[in-house]
Amino acid sequence: MFNTRKKKESKLLKDQEFGISLITYTSPQSINAEQFRAIRTNIEFAQVDRKLKSLLISSCIPAEGKSTVSANLAVVMAQTEKKVLIVDADMRKPTLHRTFRIDNKEGLSTLIANPEVKFNQVVQHNPETGLYLLPCGPIPPNPSELLGSARMTSIMHELNQYFDLIIYDTPPITAVADPQILATRVDGILMVLRYGYVRREEVRQAKEILDNVNANILGYVMNGVPREEGSGYYSYYGYGYGHDSEKDSKGE
C-alpha cells in the first residue's frame, strides 16, 4: 500500500495548498492548462513507434520553471488514466514536497541509501490528482554518486515495471552532472527554456552535454512567452522540437 493523504486534509488542496504553480489542477480550463494538454499530445505523437515509460525534465540554467512544468505535465498525464509517478531527483533544491504539501522525511535518497526499503514505503499517492509522488527525502552530501549508483539503476528498472510513466525532475543541465547521469537511463528528455531569460550559448551548452551521452531529446517547452489577449498579456507554455531550441530567446 502507498501512503495516501487523509481526505480531511485534501479538502484544502485546491484553494490553499497547491497554489498557482499547479495550474492544471487549480484552473483546468485556463489557457495555460490547455497548453500542457497540447504538450502531452505532442509527446505522445513523438513516440508513436516507441513506448515512453520514463521522461526526464530539466532546464539549461536555474529558475526556468522546470519543476512547475514537471508537476503540471504529470497532472495532465495522469488525467489519461495512466499510472503516473513524479520523482524529485533534484537532490540539491527539491520542490516536489512543497508543491504537493507532502512529507519529505523519506524519499528517493532514503530509497537509494537503504536497500531494505521498498519503493511503496516511500512513494505517496495523491488522490486529488491521481498522481504518485516520490519526494527527494533528506538532502544527501553526494547527489551525483547516489544517482549514478547501481542501486539507482535498479530502482528505476523496478519503477518502470510498476508505473505507466515516470517523470524525473532534475537539476539544471549546465549546473551539475546529475541530469546527464540519468539521461542515459530514461526514454526521453524534455528541456524547459524561459523566454527572455536563457541565452543561446546556454541552450547550446546544455544540448551538447546531452548529445555527448546520446540522450533522446524529445523537444523543449518555452516557458513564460507573452501573448496578447485584449489589452493584457499572460504567460503560456509552448512545445517545440529540439533543433529549434537553439534559437536565442533574448533576441541576441
Image (tube, rainbow, N blue to C red):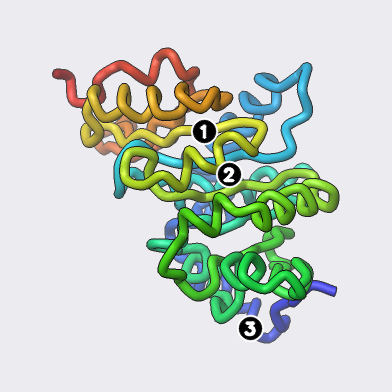
Residue depicted at x 68% and y 40%: 54
188 lies above or below 14: above
Q: Secondary structure at mark 3?
A: helix
Labels 2 & 1 near each other (Cβ < 8 A): yes
SS of the residue under disc 2: helix
Vertically, is 93 above or below 121? above
User: Quick one: label 2 or label 1, which is nearer the N terminus?
Assistant: 2
Identify which amino acid the numbered label 1 is placed on: Leu
Which residue in the structure is indicated by mark 1?
Answer: 190
Mark 3 vs 1: CB contact within 8 A: no
Q: Tell me the CA gap for discs 2 and 1.
A: 11 Å
Task: Write down the residue under mark 3.
Answer: 9
Q: Is residue 175 above or below residue 34?
A: below
Mark 3 or 1 closer to N-term?
3
Q: CA distance from mark 3 to mark 1?
A: 33 Å
Q: Which residue is mark 2?
A: 73
- Is 172 in front, or is 149? 149
Q: Position of residue 224 (x, y in %)?
A: 33, 38
Measure the alpha-carbon separation of dots 2 and 3.
24 Å
